Image (cartoon, rainbow, N blue to C red):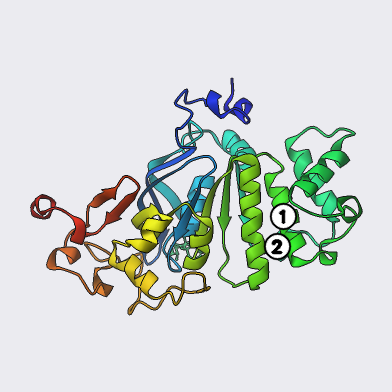
Amino acid sequence: MSPADTMTEPEASPSGGVVDAPLLSVEHLKTQFFTSRGVVKAVDDVSFTLRAGETLGVLGESGSGKSVTALSILRLVPSPAGRIVGGRIMLDGEDILRVPDSRMRKIRGKLISMILQDPLTSLNPVFTVGDQVAESLRIHQPADGRLRERVLSLLKRVGIPDAERRLESYPHQFSGGMRQRAVGAISIASGPKLLIADEPTTSLDVTIQAQYLRLLKDLQKQSNLAILFITHDLGVAARVCDRVAVMYCGRIVEEAAVRDLFDRPAHPYTRGLIGSLPKLDRRVDRLTSIPGQPPQLYDVPPGCPFAPRCSEAMDICSRKVPPEVSLASTHRVACWLHADDESRHD
Ligand SMILES: Nc1ncnc2c1ncn2[C@@H]1O[C@H](COP(=O)(O)OP(=O)(O)OP(=O)(O)O)[C@@H](O)[C@H]1O
Ligand SMILES: [Mg+2]
């Protein structure tokens, strides 16, 4: 059986593994850009897992490697400058860095879907919404007389009222919230298992933002989707994520269940981010209130990349990359403050 045949039956995963195995497992991923200034280590030894039905937030300042991580999973890192130079990415039992391009194209179209928050740029203004949803279905399923029915059912699933009438509307005749729903319909047309949502840096109207987050949650519930949710916004991460991975300079410096991250942040960087948040449910667009700037990624100093900005830095921090320390079953941190004496001495 080809992996594509197992779309609706997670038990029959090609890995033959347990049903509970993660849908996505990123292991020691390294993605670099070879530029005239040097090698940009955009993603530097990143590991995480994601299960069906779960939302993992990826949080970090601009340039920390969030989008490049997503592009690596899609195998769409811009070449020739960008290259995945190490690691493994397992998706639904398949080692997707090793499959041929033809298979990867199918995986991108079917198993993984990417949704952008800005509904204006995701819909084509010259075609009706109905046609655009139909097109996304046609790519994945053979066209038949029931296409209109399927488009309608998809529009209803994402909560577009009066879908029959709206089929003939153009995107500009839709409200922002409705456009997002149409984009949502397109993104689930293939029946994906993994949805990657990469927030743009521009801030959205608060109401539209809230609608978008609700839509994502609805889509997730309906199809047991795994969601990788990339954001700058700590408040948003708190609302939608089960777990959060905090990235700094291409590395995950801390990962925890969302409550633990807010109640017991262990990395000084995470503490700085949380300390900079006026109130958990208030929006912050930029997480830059920690003094100093991240280093250039083609010139990362030895040791912990946060050390130059860290108020708790010790001598070892600027000499040796900190080991990853497990604080609880779902809480890990890469910081010398939490390392045992033994690892400091070898
Ligand atoms: N095509 C490219 N060529 C060279 N360097 C790149 C390229 N694309 C990304 N980078 C570098 O990789 C690093 C990570 O970029 P990435 O886009 O993943 O950041 P990000 O965390 O998504 O930031 P933002 O929050 O602004 O979207 C940055 O230093 C960026 O300059
Ligand atoms: Mg980005």
Left or right of residue 59, residue 101 in this image: right
Vertical placement of 131 versus 1: above or below? below
Ligand 2 closer than 8 Å to label 1 CB: no
Ligand 2 closer than 8 Å to label 2 CB: no
Give percent across and percent down for residue 92.
51, 33
- SS under mark 2: helix
Image quarter where the N terminus lies is top right
Residue that label 2 marks: 119
Left or right of residue 168, residue 301 in this image: left
Extreme residue in the top direction? 1
Mark sitting on residue 183: 1
- CA–CA distance in space, label 2 to label 1: 7 Å
Vertical placement of 211 versus 310: above or below? above
Give percent across and percent down for residue 280.
47, 70
- Give the quarter of the image for residue 162: bottom right
Residue situated in front as seen by the camera: 67 or 185? 185
The kind of residue tagged 1 is Val
The first of marks 2 and 1 along the sequence is: 2
Give percent across and percent down for residue 206.
63, 72
| Mark 2 crowdedness (10 Å alpha carbons): few <14, some 14-19, many ≥20 | many
| Mark 1 crowdedness (10 Å alpha carbons): few <14, some 14-19, many ≥20 | many
Whether residue 324 appears in this view of the structure is yes
- Identify the residue at horizontal 8%, vertical 53% (top origin): 345
- Identify the residue at horizontal 79%, vertical 32% (top origin): 142
- Identify the residue at horizontal 36%, vertical 74% (top origin): 275
Residue situated in front as seen by the camera: 123 or 54? 54
- SS under mark 1: helix
- Identify the residue at horizontal 72%, vertical 55% (top origin): 183
Residue contact between numbered discs 2 and 1, judged by CB atoms under 8 Å = yes
